[in-house]
Amino acid sequence: MGEKHDVRNHVKRHRRQLHDMTQQELAERVGVTRQTILSIERGRYNPSVGLALRLSEVFGVPVEELFEIELETGNG
């Protein structure tokens, strides 16, 4: 078949453990709703490039530290 792309993210870990920030605080800093942050953290929504860049700026880390692509190759 083809390749499946899963995006894993570490937004929740950065937000809670490294920055002691609520979902609401992060949402306000990047200009989205708390529900958007919740959806990103649960892997239900992949942010736009612009939002991913704003998140990385807030946390002071490269985008690649927040998001990583896992490739799975399907067999037939």
Image (spheres, rainbow, N blue to C red):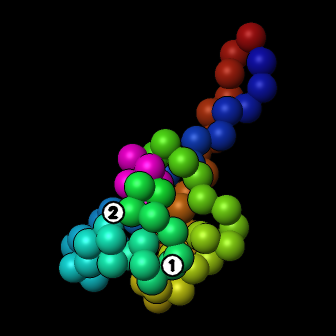
Front label number (2 vs 1): 1
Q: In this view, does 4 lie above or below 43?
A: above
Q: Which mark is residue 12?
A: 2
Residue range of the region highlighted in magenta in the rendering? 37-42
Q: Quadrant of residue 11?
A: bottom left
Q: 43 or 35: nearer the eye? A: 35
Image position, residue 6 (x, y; %): 58, 41
Q: Is the magenta stretch mostly helix, strand or loop?
A: helix
The percent coordinates of residue 54 (x first, y second) are 57, 80
Quadrant of the rendering where the N terminus is positioned: top right
Secondary structure, mark 1, is helix
Q: Who's the residue at 43% across and 78% down the image? A: 28
Amino acid tagged 1: Val
Q: Does the magenta stretch include residue 15?
A: no
According to the image, label 1 marks what residue?
Answer: 30
Residue 36 percent across, percent down from the top left: 47, 57
Name the residue located 59 percent from the left edge and 70 percent from the top edge.
52
Residue 19: % across, % down = 27, 82
